[in-house]
């Protein structure tokens, strides 16, 4: 299933790029003939208009296949996973109804009704230009079925085990990771030897050594400080 989706996505990308290139060339040639030769080509305007329609619908289908359309998931991301799965299924079913009812059935009807209407400056009919509606409708229907299966399996962006959110809650509220690391104190034992033994203290890495009053063990038994000897 993923192989089929990848093949359809690649084909849509190639078709959209070719159509966009044709539209750009048509517009450039129209400007050239109007401004340079002073004899504008009438067919370029009509070609650019209908190619723009095909490019837009093909591009929209490509973005749908990549799940790249804008989606506001602020509320859905905070719902329980079973509820998110239900929302995702309803979304795909609504897309299926639109693709089949409006694009496929409605597009075929529009193409059939205008099949005999000739274009003004290009060979062909308006019905041929309307064929993009059922074509993209069929592709969207197939992709929506694939997305529906992915959502039912919990592989979609809304049905994943952990929803995709931009404002992740940190582990320690109010303290970011850098601040948490700066609060960590690593201590190393430091041994200082005296005349009558040794004592063990601690110092903080990256900080100043703690200084305090000398312990009783640092003084000799006769009451004098070892440093005074």
Image: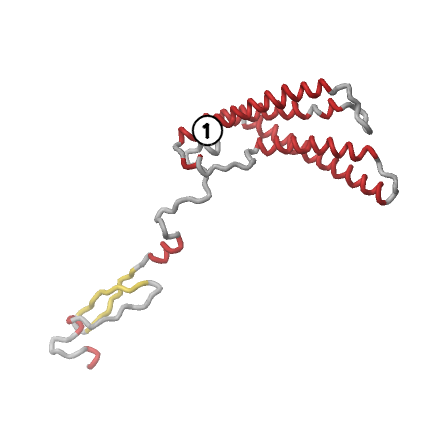
Q: Position of residue 175 (x, y in %)?
A: 37, 52
Work out whether residue 181 or residue 194 is closer to the camera in this orientation and state it. Answer: 181
Q: Quadrant of the C terminus?
A: bottom left
Work out whether residue 225 or residue 154 is closer to the camera in this orientation and state it. Answer: 154
Tell me where residue 29 sits by quadrant. Answer: top right
- At a point 73% along the width and 31% down the height, the residue shown is 50
Q: Position of residue 144 (x, y in %)?
A: 55, 26
Q: Position of residue 162 (x, y in %)?
A: 42, 36
- At a point 59% along the width and 26% down the height, the residue shown is 140
Work out whether residue 121 or residue 160 is closer to the camera in this orientation and state it. Answer: 121
Residue at the bottom extreme? 229
- At a point 84% along the width and 41% down the height, the residue shown is 34
Residue at image mark 1: 87
Count of marks placed on residues: 1
Tell me where residue 86 sits by quadrant. Answer: top left
Q: Up-down: is 66 above or below 37? A: above
């Amino acid at each position: 299933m993923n192989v089929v989706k990848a093949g359809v996505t690649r084909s849509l990308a190639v078709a959209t790029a070719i159509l966009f290139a044709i539209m750009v060339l048509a517009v450039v040639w129209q400007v050239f003939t109007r401004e340079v030769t002073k004899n504008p080509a009438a067919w370029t305007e009509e070609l650019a208009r209908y190619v723009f329609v095909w490019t837009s619908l093909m591009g929209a289908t490509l973005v749908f296949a990549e799940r790249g359309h804008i989606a506001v998931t602020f509320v859905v991301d905070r719902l329980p996973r079973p509820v998110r799965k239900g929302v995702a299924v309803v979304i795909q079913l609504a897309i299926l109804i639109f693709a089949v009812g409006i694009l496929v059935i409605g597009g075929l009807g529009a193409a059939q009704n205008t099949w005999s209407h000739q274009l003004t400056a290009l060979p062909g009919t308006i019905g041929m230009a309307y064929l993009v509606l059922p074509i993209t409708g069929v592709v969207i229907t197939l992709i929506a079925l694939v997305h529906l299966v992915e959502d039912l399996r919990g592989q979609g962006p809304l049905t994943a085990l952990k929803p995709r959110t931009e404002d992740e809650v940190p582990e320690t509220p109010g303290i970011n990771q850098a601040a948490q690391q700066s609060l960590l104190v690593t201590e190393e034992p430091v041994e200082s030897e005296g005349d009558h033994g040794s004592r063990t203290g601690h110092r903080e890495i990256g900080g100043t050594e703690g200084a305090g009053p000398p312990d009783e063990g640092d003084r000799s038994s006769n009451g004098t400080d070892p440093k005074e000897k």
